[in-house]
Image (cartoon, rainbow, N blue to C red):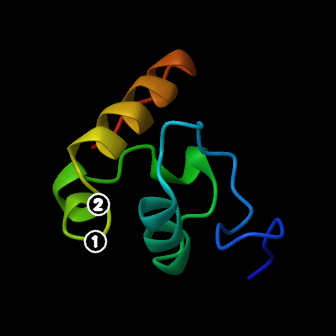
């Protein structure tokens, strides 16, 4: 998986999503924000490193695109 010179994989997630959540989402097959649309929030929350803040930030970013978590 490509990286940007740090321990964070290349993604288009908003800055408020921390590195642990970014790594967990990318490892689970979600390296792009649009891929999270309609994915149940509970499924994402079950990933180690994805907490309430990451879910809130991702949900807000999706809402800006007219999409939402499942």
Q: Where is the N terminus found, in terms of image quarters?
A: bottom right
**Left or right: where does residue 51 sit relative to residue 21?**
left
The answer to the question of whether label 2 and label 1 lie on touching residues, with beta carbons closer than 8 A, is: yes
Q: How many marks?
A: 2
Task: Please tell me which residue is depicted at 45% across the width and 43% down the height of the picture.
Answer: 37
**Left or right: where does residue 31 sit relative to residue 40?**
right
Report, in whole angstroms, how far the alpha carbon at label 2 lies from the one at label 1: 6 Å
Residue 26 in which image quadrant: bottom right
Q: Is residue 4 above or below residue 55?
A: below
The residue beneath circle 2 is 44
Task: Please tell me which residue is depicted at 34% across the width and 53% down the height of the picture.
Answer: 39
Residue sitting at the far front: 6
The residue beneath circle 1 is 47
Q: Nearer the viewer, residue 4 or 58?
A: 4
Q: Is residue 1 above or below residue 38?
A: below
Q: Nearer the viewer, residue 67 or 15?
A: 15
**Left or right: where does residue 65 sit relative to residue 46?**
right
Residue 55 in which image quadrant: top left
Q: Secondary structure at mark 2?
A: helix
Residue 28 lies, in percent from the top left, at: 45, 77
């Amino acid at each position: 998986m490509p990286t940007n010179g740090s321990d964070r994989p290349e993604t288009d997630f908003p800055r408020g999503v921390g590195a642990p959540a970014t790594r967990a989402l990318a490892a689970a097959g979600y390296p792009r924000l649009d891929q999270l649309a309609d994915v149940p929030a509970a499924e994402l929350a079950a990933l180690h490193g994805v907490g309430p803040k990451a879910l809130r930030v991702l949900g807000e970013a999706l809402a800006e695109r007219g999409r939402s978590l499942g």
